[in-house]
Image (cartoon, rainbow, N blue to C red):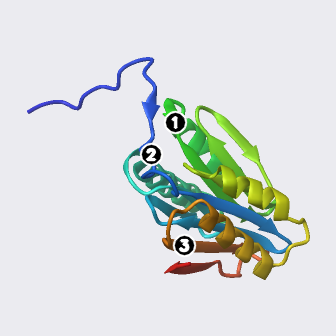
Amino acid sequence: MSSPKPKPDNKKFQSQPSSGFGSIMVGVLFDDGIVLAINTVGNLIYYLDDHIYCGASSTGFDRESLMEVSTKLENIARNNSNKGVTVAQALDLIVKLYEQVEIAELLLAGEDPSGLHLIALKCPGTSARVNYAALGPGSAASSEYIKSQWRPDMNLRHAEQLARAALLMGSMSKVGVDVCIIFKRSPESATRVEGHDSS
């Protein structure tokens, strides 16, 4: 019986890149929540907790790691008498798992007792809390568009329109779009997750 292959020391790993131009993730903060949107060219919105989601590659290292984060957060919540978890706890787990990853881009979005959080992560070890972001191959035009259009008092309708338009700017043709909207409400309120469409 063969034993598991040990991880080489001092080796940098690479997250599975999304497939080519147009594989974009967008996050937009608005007056009552966060819009997290992706096109479905190699991307996925991962459920981490009731009010915490993450946009990342849909395959390889990202998929395995974020599923592990979700499981660990569930255990933390259970051990904490189901009082919930924080975005900071999710970020800490992600950063630890990605310590040896050389290339990866993720968008972490969530709400906890300290408020709304939209965090852009670029490995190795770089994260920033932002009001808006566009990540992924071909996202330069999307980033510039969001920067020119975003306003701090945007409502849900305008924020979702902005996110969808930014996704289209980085896509060569119509692709599927998944949108997750996290509301700034009480813990009892639901998080709305939409199925993908072709926008």
The residue labelled by disc 3 is 178
Residue 72: assigned label: none
Left or right: 2, with 142 as reference point: left
Q: CA distance from mark 3 to mark 2?
A: 19 Å
> In the rendered view of the protein, which quadrant contains the N terminus?
top left
Location of mark 1 (residue) = 103
Element marked by disc 1 = strand
From mark 1 to mark 2, how far is it between C-alphas?
8 Å
Which comes sooner in the sequence, label 3 or label 2? 2
For badge 1, the amino acid type reads Ile
Q: Badge 2: how crowded within 10 Å, few (<14), some, or many (20+)?
A: many
Q: Amino acid at mark 3?
A: Asp
The residue wearing badge 2 is 17
10 Å crowding of disc 3: few (<14), some (14-19), many (20+): many
Kind of residue sitting beneath label 2? Pro
Specify which label sits upstream in the sequence, 1 or 3: 1
| Tag 1 near tag 3, CB within 8 Å | no
Q: Is residue 185 visible?
A: no
